[in-house]
Image (cartoon, rainbow, N blue to C red):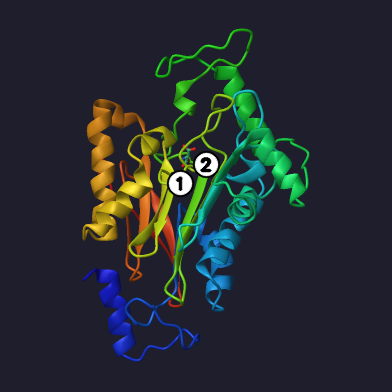
Amino acid sequence: MSLNRRHFINLTSLGVAGFSIKGFANTSSNKSIKPIVISTWDAGLNANKGAWAVLGNGGSALDAVEKGVMVTEDEKNCCVGLGANPDRDGFVTLDASIMDHEFNCGSVGFLERIKHPISVARKVMENTPHVMLVGEGAQQFALSQGFTLESGEMSDDAKAAYKQWLKKSTYKPIINVERKGSTAQLDAKYIAPHKLDTGEWNHDTIGMVALDAHGNLSGSCTTSGAGFKLRGRLGDSPIIGAGLYVDNEVGAVVATGQGEDVIRVAGASAVVEQMRQGKSPQEACQFVVERIRRIKKEKANDIQVCFIALNKDGAYGSYALHKGFNYAVQTNEGAKLVESPFIY
Ligand code: ASP
């Protein structure tokens, strides 16, 4: 039994009340379920508040994970949404995905000038026979669903960062790409979430997973991808099974970090499968992070990859390749930021 689960049970047996929802039960085991939401990085603290406004009132995990990450998408000059860093051509392009407890899922990629990609992803899930829409088609679909076309102007922070990037724009051949006729050459250092002088990791994503009082799991993920990426690049976040996966019998997992390396191992799905084999959320995340380290060999020094996982019983955990990843947790007992365990 995990520590988290034990903690919940102890509190229950002590009669610690707190949560006011009555009458909900996990249909599979009839245990009483305490809602919980967890999300990546410290921006998750605010995002979780948005999710908790839904979960704490008996709402569904699906509504919670949409509303939660919308808070971050709304933040100006943030790492996510239209305020985020652009691609190397100066355009902000957004990816997002959402998945519920019944394997329904939707995603958008390379979406421009739409404020809430997570809500477009949900509309893809609910109002189309498809799972994924990208680019112009995704934008057209968003407009048809009543979303507004925003100006496309960069936020002040993004403008400053882009100006700075254009100044340097040295080409480092980790990925051997050179664009003829472009003044902005590729600096591969900016393709990956990279280590800042402060020792922290630059990141551009919020991922969230939640369990509601009905015992149902859902997850969401929204991002501007990697800052100064090649135009057209998609990361793991809009790819169901890579950046996000939910199996209501087992658990929900979301990834952040170098998307290419999460895609390579079908990361979120791989973590869920490890939980299915009996691993705790943290052990399952660690197993897949270690697999990525083995694949990348010494190149694992240059990238960050992190997973957070929540299982059907409300136990949660995480693992990161490098130090510096944290995630936010919200239950009826309050909010906290947790430093993730890591390899390096
Ligand atoms: N996983 C995201 C991507 O590769 C980036 C991030 O998490 O910061 O697009």
As drawn, the label of residue 315 is none
Amino acid identity at mark 1: Ile
Q: Nearer the viewer, mark 2 or mark 1?
A: 1
What secondary structure is found at the residue carrying circle 2? Answer: loop
Q: Residue at x 28, y 47 (%)?
A: 342
What secondary structure is found at the residue carrying circle 1? Answer: loop
Q: Is residue 37 above or below residue 231?
A: below
Q: Is residue 84 visible?
A: yes
**Quadrant of the image containing the N terminus:** bottom left
**Quadrant of the image containing the C terminus:** top left
Residue 246 occupies quadrant = bottom left
Location of residue 198 in the rendering, given as x and y in whole percent from the top left corner: 43, 39
Location of residue 302 in the rendering, given as x and y in whole percent from the top left corner: 35, 29
Residue that sits furthest to the top in the current view: 180
Label 2 residue near ligand 1, CB within 8 Å:
yes
The residue that label 1 is drawn on is 240
Q: Residue at x 58, y 45 (%)?
A: 80
Q: Is residue 61 above or below residue 56?
A: above
The residue that label 2 is drawn on is 204
Q: Is residue 341 above or below residue 50?
A: above
Gap between marks 2 and 1 measured at Cα = 18 Å
